[in-house]
Amino acid sequence: MNGAESLVRTLVASGVDTCFANPGTSEMHFVAALDRVAGMRCVLGLFEGVVSGAADGYARMTDKPAATLLHLGPGLGNALANLHNARKANTPVVNIVGDHATHHRRYDAPLTSDVEGVARPMSSWVKTSMDARSVARDGAEAVAASLAGAGGVATLILPADTAWNESDGPAAPVPVAARPKVSDDALREAVSALRSGEPTLILVGGRAQRARTMELASRIAETCGARVLGPTSNARIERGAGRPRLDRIFYVVGRALEQLSDIRRVVLVGTQEPVAFFAYPGKPSLVLPPECQVHAFAKPEDDILDALERLADAVGATATSPLIQPLSRPDLPTGAITPETIGAVVGALLPENAIVVDESINAGRGVYPATIGAPAHDWLQLTGGSIGIGLPLATGAAVACPDRPVVALQADGSGMYTLQALWTQARENLNITTIIFSNRAYASLETELHNVGATNPGRTALDMLDLSRPDLDWVKLAEGMGVEAARADTVEKLIDLFGQSVKRPGPFLIEVPC
Amino acid sequence: MNGAESLVRTLVASGVDTCFANPGTSEMHFVAALDRVAGMRCVLGLFEGVVSGAADGYARMTDKPAATLLHLGPGLGNALANLHNARKANTPVVNIVGDHATHHRRYDAPLTSDVEGVARPMSSWVKTSMDARSVARDGAEAVAASLAGAGGVATLILPADTAWNESDGPAAPVPVAARPKVSDDALREAVSALRSGEPTLILVGGRAQRARTMELASRIAETCGARVLGPTSNARIERGAGRPRLDRIFYVVGRALEQLSDIRRVVLVGTQEPVAFFAYPGKPSLVLPPECQVHAFAKPEDDILDALERLADAVGATATSPLIQPLSRPDLPTGAITPETIGAVVGALLPENAIVVDESINAGRGVYPATIGAPAHDWLQLTGGSIGIGLPLATGAAVACPDRPVVALQADGSGMYTLQALWTQARENLNITTIIFSNRAYASLETELHNVGATNPGRTALDMLDLSRPDLDWVKLAEGMGVEAARADTVEKLIDLFGQSVKRPGPFLIEVPC
């Protein structure tokens, strides 16, 4: 068996059974091997940012990596933006990137580039296989590397001859070290903070945002009189009825400063100290008050569940009831389309066990609060600020969870970066309802332009933020890629379209002017 | 004036008057400065690969760089694939990439990444401005760096505080060294090769493919009994009636080997030794016969015109007439849509002084031969093998040359990577006729899959090459971005649509099933 087949078999043996692919010539041996190896589902994306964003969405829902299959340095380059988001989400991803045959690289053929150099900024592990007999072992190491620590992006570069030459067959999975337990010192420090009598915040991020860990955090907070919040950007929050409610730190620096102004102690669980998304002249980078003490209790890579169980024990919270959100949906709205009425439609009609993917930026701000009491669901966000994640993330989540309805809240400007994901949704008949918030502007930049002091911007500057002239028609864009779509110009129409779409299989897109 | 404004003024003073932009928060000071500085045209792209590909197309037609405006590491990441193509074309490009304020970078905010690391693989020059007073000088250096040598990608990273803090005003342009003359030794060696009596090839690439330099090459070849060819992938060929004809080395390795089998001497002018695009088991990387001597006469960065003038003098070719292609168009075809009939339509109807952008890969193979005798035009190709260049390249060429009709020959698979370029074509009302070769497959990969020995591929492998299920509808995709479009199912319809479109302003897209 050749190197490519040994790799596919090794990936499957290591638990990687899904590959999001945009292959080229150098990856044809890998593609050919797919016919000979059972157990690997391969999903085609028509652009590499779709592939990497889908791998992120898949792993956020399964806690195991998908593979990507990418074509040399430029293909990996196109994947980088969503790999950046995956990296910031601590998502395990295994990139398989083809390269020129080892003996061909010296000739500077057109596609030659420094593939490792392209990989490094967004990868926690990078390796180029040296020969066909190393490929299987390298693949097993890549899977383990993606799962090491808090989870990360592992990139394995496969020169074409390592794929086509004879191998020694598949390699055994490489064991992944168990997540470390937090130290007794850290535990004592957290207990001391919670019992300090000072206003204390438990900031839960990453793996601490699952229902079970958030219940523990809620118990601890209730026992000690602390608050619980999440960071602004989160990989996956288990929320809704029957679970603790999680509010997040505001994105806008001024609002975050106000929100956190009374806090004097912060216990970090699965996340880092909160910082402003951007710096602004005369505003601080850190959003906690200067006098606040920060206690790094459980790091993202730690055994979070164990840490919170021990902390709950230590503060005597085991018997305390967590604050659980009851089922509570908004009424179906009437009136104009606004962020609030769109939120109410989603809150009123969100199906059981949904996955919500939120890249709605400004325009979707009404949906998170309106779904607090909706049936239990997962909430996935843009984590690294690199827009263009929503449609791919929804695609990957739907591949991971074929029995769950996926709702994608998508701003129009960011949706345009990776709109090709719609085609994959159609091909795979994924159960995704996309709401496009069509404000025809980079609306957040209008605010930012004002923030930098351009209070009366002229036509030239405004043109850079304006997505009209011509208007984007998302119904046609979706239909052009085989996804049924319609425009909802009224709340009644939105209720009708959204209500129908979440009940039936397959993708559907609703463009909402707002 | 702040750093951003000092930079914009410096760019304009240095001859950079066009900026292709996809800005974010960190770039708002640059955007705001556009209102205060005359002389900078800013063109919005809805995806960064559009921006970088357009900058490439602009500079190929003007021989001077455009600026790009990109948002931190991920924005630059999205631009990399087409920057790779620009790098391989020796195109001057000046990237302006915003980053977090210097004091904010240490906090690992969501958008933080190693921007220099992302830039380095595709840039010949990378610098991060240290403070606002350095920005103008750094900008002038970036322009000069993009024009140094054969031309390249210069990336200037602008932390937000260097944009918003007070500067010392604009900087003077940095002089660019004249292109070096080829040495007398190299000249003597080339003369000796041409007079060796052995079968000799003059391989002209890069700047040697302008009409005037190709006339000199043709004179030399006629005098010495040599052949003239171009490489497989070329940035810009001036061709058509009234100019020397330039055939290219075949892409398929076997055909290239045959084409070059009798060659014993090669004189390189503005290009490197030809190599196979990909390596294949048992096939050579080099396509020249092993016994062929290679003479690196004029390197891409040399003064090519001077080199060819001196060589023509030295071999006594000054009075020889070049072989000039007469005006000769194919008849308008009838019958089925085939690569040949599509080629004949374009050849029969190509307007005067057109710019042809060719990313038609397999399906458009009939157009190059059918346009040999069309009115004089420029022919721009994919140079680095990173597909997704065609629609952006056409966009940039049309911005550069508003008085010339642009014809884009675009394969459907590669068109999907950067289809957002159509929106920019509509917004700027660019005079571009796009023909989409809609074969609904990564057709070149079908051949490659066969080449790697998968002679009877199964459904799983074939699915990775198949763009049907669902079919892409390019008419809807174009209309969704404000570009008029129609489908040509017959040759007669194609004649009608193409003939009308090239005569009127504004973008139009024709989807041709093939």
Image (cartoon, coloured by chain):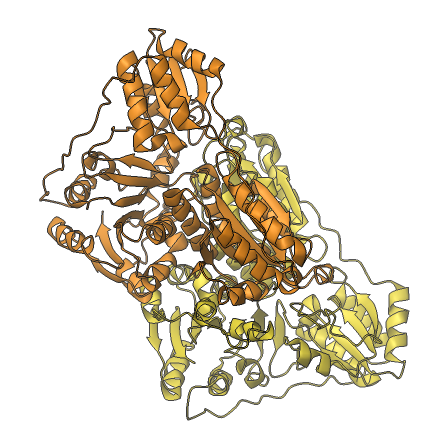
Chain colours: A orange, B yellow
Residue B81 image point, x, y percent? 55, 56
Q: Is B308 left or right of A382, judged from the image as shown?
A: right
Q: Is B306 left or right of A467, judged from the image as shown?
A: right
Q: Is A270 left or right of A347, judged from the image as shown?
A: right
Residue A147 image point, x, y percent? 50, 40
As drawn, A87 above or below B190: above
B492 or B307, which is in the foreground? B492
Q: Residue at x 20, y 52 (%)?
A: A502
Q: Residue at x 51, y 84 (%)?
A: B347
Residue A161 image point, x, y percent? 66, 62
Is residue B29 visible to the viewer in this orientation of the structure? no
* Picture quarter with the N terminus of chain A: bottom right
Q: Residue at x 47, y 28 (%)?
A: A302
Where on the picture, by quarter, is residue A240?
A: top left
B215 or A138, which is in the foreground? A138
A443 or B18, which is in the foreground? A443
Residue B220 image point, x, y percent? 80, 80
A299 or B181, which is in the foreground? A299
As drawn, B181 above or below A461: below
Is residue A159 visible to the viewer in this orientation of the structure? yes
Q: Residue at x 36, y 50 (%)?
A: A400
